[in-house]
Image (spheres, grey):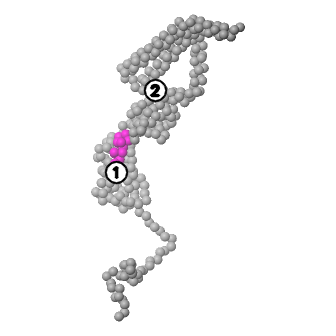
């Protein structure tokens, strides 16, 4: 048989098959367009609904994305059945299941972050605006998405953390409460009265505006330092990092000023040197002391060089 005729017959058959399924293909494409419009409509309707019900923004975003994905999956399956009549819904679901397993192995990390993001949005262990710490990273939560969480560090840098990292590691939420405890160590000399020193420090800390009045200031003598009696000064202030730094600065300045006004010594480290062998004290002759004042020419200032010369 002529090879050209074989190719021509194959092309004619392909064209005939294409024309035979063209109506179904047109209906399938039209259904996909309807699916796109339906997905947009569902997303907007849910957005308006969640806005009226005042649902958490992050949780509303999760539900909207899940509804968007479900609409598209249903639309794609229906279009496949319309275009290919031999494909039944059961076969399509089977193929979708097998394909999802293969895709799951290929994109394991992506799906891991996706599931972790869903759980974080549902459980909400932290909220937008919270100051969190995870491993070596800390900052304010700016955005929580299905895949990752964006935090703004105190130096202005933005860090994108995969949700799986936040889900599988300990996260410290520093702004869970509006106040937080902070502590400094203050030392006074061994010769000072401990009770009087404690009261002076308390009187300096309690009236400060950055010190919370909702909880008491706690001052304890914590131990014997190298050159001082150490006090642990604990108080409550705002939970944001800037509030803590500002309050710490205010407390340190007030304690230093009050101890100075009360003539209570804040010592610096003393060092005592001990020698195993006794040290002798050497006396320096008067002649040797006088020789130290001689100038570079060997002359004593204010004395004539011939003064000791015999006449």
Image side of residue 120 versus residue 237, left or right:
right
Q: Looking at the rendering, in which quadrant would you find the C terminus?
A: bottom left
| Percent of width and height locating residue 151 | 43, 35
**243 is within the stretch colored magenta:** yes
| Percent of width and height locating residue 172 | 45, 38
Q: Mark 1 vs mark 2: which is more N-terminal?
A: 2
| Percent of width and height locating residue 42 | 43, 16
Q: In the picture shown, does residue 18 fall above or below 57?
A: above
Residue 236: which quarter of the image?
A: top left
- Mark 1 closeness class: few <14, some 14–19, many ≥20 residues within 10 Å: some
Q: In the picture shown, does residue 177 fall above or below 84?
A: below
Q: In the picture shown, does residue 143 fall above or below 195?
A: above
311 or 126: nearer the viewer: 311
Q: Secondary structure at mark 1?
A: helix
What residue sits 40% from the left and 81% below the top?
A: 288
Magenta stretch: give its range: 236-249
Residue 210: which quarter of the image?
A: top left
* Disc 2 target residue: 122
* Disc 1 target residue: 252
């Amino acid at each position: 048989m002529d090879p050209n005729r074989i190719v021509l017959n194959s092309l004619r058959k392909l064209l005939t098959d294409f024309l035979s399924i063209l109506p179904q293909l047109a209906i399938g494409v039209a259904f996909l367009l309807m699916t796109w419009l339906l997905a947009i409509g569902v997303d907007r309707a849910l957005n308006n609904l969640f806005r009226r019900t005042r649902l958490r923004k992050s949780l509303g975003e999760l539900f909207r994305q899940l509804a968007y994905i479900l609409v598209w999956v249903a639309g794609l399956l229906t279009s496949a059945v319309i275009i290919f009549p031999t494909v039944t819904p059961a076969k399509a679901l089977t193929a979708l299941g097998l394909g999802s397993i293969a895709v799951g192995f290929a994109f394991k990390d992506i799906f891991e972050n996706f599931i972790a993001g869903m759980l974080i949005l549902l459980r909400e262990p932290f909220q937008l605006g919270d100051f969190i710490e995870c491993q070596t990273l800390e900052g304010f939560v700016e955005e929580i998405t299905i895949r990752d969480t964006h935090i703004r560090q105190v130096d202005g840098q933005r860090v994108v953390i995969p949700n799986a990292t936040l889900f599988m590691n300990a996260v410290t939420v520093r702004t869970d409460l509006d106040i937080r405890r902070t502590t400094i160590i203050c030392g006074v000399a061994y010769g000072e009265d401990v009770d009087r020193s404690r009261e002076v420090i308390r009187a300096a800390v309690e009236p400060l505006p950055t010190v919370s009045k909702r909880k008491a200031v706690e001052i304890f003598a914590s131990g014997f330092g190298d050159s001082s009696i150490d006090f642990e000064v604990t108080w409550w202030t705002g939970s944001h990092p800037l509030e803590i730094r500002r309050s710490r600065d205010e407390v340190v300045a007030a304690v230093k000023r009050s101890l100075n006004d009360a003539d209570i010594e804040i010592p610096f480290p003393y060092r005592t040197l001990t020698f195993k062998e006794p040290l002798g004290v050497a006396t320096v002759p008067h002649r040797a002391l006088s020789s130290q004042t001689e100038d570079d020419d060997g002359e004593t200032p204010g004395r004539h060089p011939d003064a000791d010369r015999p006449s």
